[in-house]
């Protein structure tokens, strides 16, 4: 038997607005990877700049789904978590890490909770502490700079950053537990934006940058995370997987900017799926 790689993506479903599962599913699938899902909540839209959204909590469904999967003895190569809405979900997901794929699946945590120096308004102030706990159980974490400093209990600083600062963040983040860190939102000037990667086992630090496009485009963290997961599982080394994801995300932002659509409604990642698949499937 030669089964495809299989990922379990644990995020909410925001029915409109292109983030979390509506982004993870198509991007990971486009790379030829089977993407199973555990929806943590059902919302009419995401919560970023849109009021009046509906919200149905699905926390109590998570364990029954996982137990059923266990009874089927399914193999999983990775678990990829994103937006998690409560301490209870953090706790359940950390238990799920020990169950899915018999605890052997790669654990990739995107500690989605903040950006631009502020915690999303749906989270209590001590949420970063809980998220740090989940990150301590991960193999790879993919925070942005705001999420990184909140978990490290350090003040947020506006960029541009120094190499020394970024590399000290990488090392402190890896001390939380995950041996591999992908830090997003890294910039050393106002022209380019990208990521820094760190592999504690090899000590290797990598960078990848692309042209900085002004504006806060919603869902880009999930586009990046999903493309990173896809590339990494296709066998790209950590820094190259991150570079592929940067390239794809920036392409999606550039198309959206050119189209001039509402930046709250997510980015046009769909038109780049063909090219992404061609680059990743080798
Ligand atoms: O893109 C992250 C995200 C995912 N899911 C929901 C969100 C957000 C960010 O605001 O509100 C529901």
Image: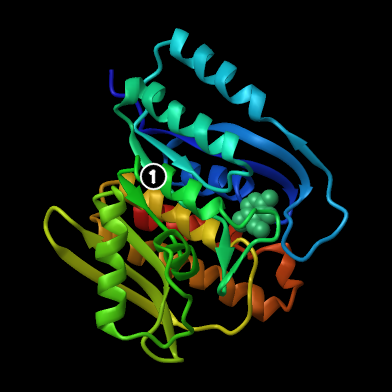
Q: Is residue 146 above or below residue 200?
A: below
Residue at 57%, 31% in the rendered image = 38
24 lies left or right of 142? right
Q: Position of residue 155 (x, y in %)?
A: 46, 75
Q: Is residue 82 visible?
A: yes
List the single residue furthest toward the right: 52
Q: In this view of the protein, which residue sits in the foreground, 219 or 162?
A: 162
- Quarter that holds the N terminus: top left
Residue at 62%, 41% in the rendered image:
86
Q: Is residue 244 above or below residue 251?
A: above
Q: Is the residue marked by circle 1 packed among few (<14), some (14-19), or many (20+) residues within 10 Å? A: many
The residue located at (25%, 73%) in the rendering is: 167
Q: Residue drawn 49% across and 41% down?
A: 29
Of all residues shown, which one is farthest toward the bottom? 190
Looking at the rendering, the quadrant in which ligand 1 lies is bottom right
Dot 1 corresponds to which residue?
108
Q: Nearer the viewer, residue 195 or 160?
A: 160
Across and down, in percent, residue 21 comes to 60, 44
Query: Does 131 sit left or right of 177 as displayed?
Result: right
Image side of residue 54 versus residue 107, left or right: right
Is residue 7 positioned above or below 170 on the image?
above
| Residue furthest left as drawn | 202
Q: Secondary structure at mark 1?
A: strand
**Residue 117 rendering spot, x and y as whole percentages:** 55, 73
Whether residue 163 sits left or right of residue 216 in the image: it is left
Question: From this viewpoint, is residue 281 visible?
Answer: no
How far across and how far down the image is residue 113, in percent?
57, 57
**58 or 191: nearer the viewer:** 58
Quarter occupied by residue 75? top left
Q: Is mark 1 within 8 Å of ligand 1?
A: no
């Amino acid at each position: 038997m030669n089964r495809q790689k299989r990922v379990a993506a644990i995020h909410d479903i925001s029915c409109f607005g292109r983030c979390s599962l509506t982004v993870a599913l198509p991007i990971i699938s486009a790379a030829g990877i089977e993407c199973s899902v555990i929806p943590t909540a059902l919302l009419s839209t995401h919560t970023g700049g849109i009021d009046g959204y509906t919200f149905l909590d699905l926390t109590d469904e998570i364990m029954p789904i996982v137990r059923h999967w266990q009874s089927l003895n399914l193999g999983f190569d990775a678990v990829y978590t994103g937006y998690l809405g409560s301490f209870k979900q953090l706790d359940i997901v950390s238990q799920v890490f020990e169950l899915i794929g018999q605890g052997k699946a790669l654990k990739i945590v995107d500690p989605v909770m903040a950006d631009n120096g502020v915690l999303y308004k749906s989270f209590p102030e001590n949420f970063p502490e809980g998220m740090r706990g989940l990150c301590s159980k991960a193999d790879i974490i993919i925070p942005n700079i705001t999420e990184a400093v909140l978990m490290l209990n350090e003040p947020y600083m506006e960029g541009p950053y120094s190499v020394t600062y970024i590399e000290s963040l990488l090392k402190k983040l890896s001390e939380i537990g995950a041996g591999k860190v992908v830090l997003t939102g890294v910039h050393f000037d106002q022209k380019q934006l990208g990521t820094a990667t760190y592999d504690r086992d090899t000590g290797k630090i990598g960078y990848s940058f692309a042209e900085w496009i002004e504006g806060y485009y919603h869902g880009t963290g999930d586009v990046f995370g999903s493309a990173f997961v896809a590339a990494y599982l296709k066998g790209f080394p950590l820094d190259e997987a991150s570079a592929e994801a940067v390239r794809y995300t920036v392409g999606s932002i550039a198309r959206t900017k050119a189209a001039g659509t509402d930046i709250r409604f997510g980015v046009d990642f769909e038109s780049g799926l063909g090219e992404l698949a061609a680059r990743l499937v080798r």
